[in-house]
Image (cartoon, grey):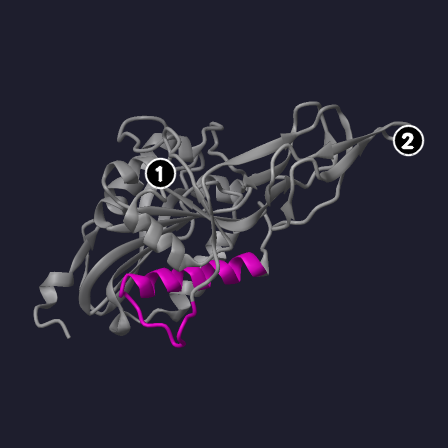
Amino acid sequence: MNDNPQENTIEIAKEIIPPGRSRRLDLPVSRLPTQTLLSLPVTIVNGLDPGPKLWLSAAIHGDELNGVEIIRQVLAQIRPEKLRGTLLAVPIVNVFGFIEQSRYLPDRRDLNRSFPGSEKGSLASRLAFLFMREIVSQSTHGIDLHTAAINRVNLPQIRGNLQDPETHRCAKAFGTKIMLHANTRDGSLRQAATKKGIPVLLYEAGEALRFNAEAIAIGVQGILRVMNCLDMYDLAETVSETETIEVTSSKWIRASRGGIFHLGVNLGEKVVKKQELGFITDAVGESQIKVRASVSGIVLSYSLNPLVNQGDAIVHLAIIN
């Protein structure tokens, strides 16, 4: 038990959350043309005892819904009196895109290319700045939840800087089948947080505008595993170590011609170089061309839209030797 409760007091947007309490906050972002105020929904669960401060974020792209449900289920299981440290949960970061069921903000900007943001910049930049100031600056670790872009589906996977020991430790604890070392992208939340020395995991699973029960279950358990690894929360049951394949690179297989793509592999399937992944036909089937793997790997993602143009990315492989 913490003998000095002040040690684990946290302040978000001038609101003080004492130890052993959970608080729902709404951080004002901007008004719509109708003058309706949109706010960033935040739930803070503050443990009795000090410990890591872990942020959970979802729907940075407004059409990526699995993470919203993952965070809801995690919050339903966490009791502040049993928590060591603090959980900062933001289930809908891009509130504008979420309402419109769109990946982007109203001006078509990608919020995940707008970090660390600016207090006086574009709407995306201001929202990024608010998230950095109120959430990231308070955190010691982060987990950002995503799905594939529209018309694609992702195998549940963890991405991060696996060369960083703390990130690697948390990634291994999360327990997905694949851990992919990924460099940060300019303007991404992960890049901005990494520059502050905060290890961040990126969880990718499922597809946009859809709930996927398996992806959600893996995400919930993964977060709880990470919290256990960080000594923030004790799991109800002993967790056995998951077999995880660590990869350092991936490659999209692209359509060599336009037509209708017939997929012949499944998510998570191992394929070898030159193996057939499917085939492309014209509308009446007068011509057909096979699509083959240019590397050996594991199927991470694929296009859900069978209509393809020459050069379209259709199957994503994690490269293995």
Q: Position of residue 286 (x, y in %)?
A: 91, 28
Q: Is residue 258 above or below residue 100?
A: above
Q: Secondary structure at mark 2?
A: loop
Residue for point 73% across, 33% down: 291
**Residue with the most extreme left position:** 4
Q: Which residue is mark 2?
A: 284
Quarter of the image that includes the N terminus = bottom left
What secondary structure is found at the residue carrying circle 1? helix
Image quadrant in which you'd find residue 175: bottom left
Please report the residue visible at 24 percent of the width from the left and 50 percent of the height from the top.
139
Residue 167, given in percent of the width and then of the height, sits at 32, 48
Q: Position of residue 31 (x, y in %)?
A: 38, 38
Give the residue number, with chain letter if any, for mark 1: 189
Query: Total label count?
Result: 2
Q: Is residue 52 above or below residue 112?
A: below
Residue stretch in magenta: 214-240
Q: Is residue 265 rendered magenta in the image?
A: no
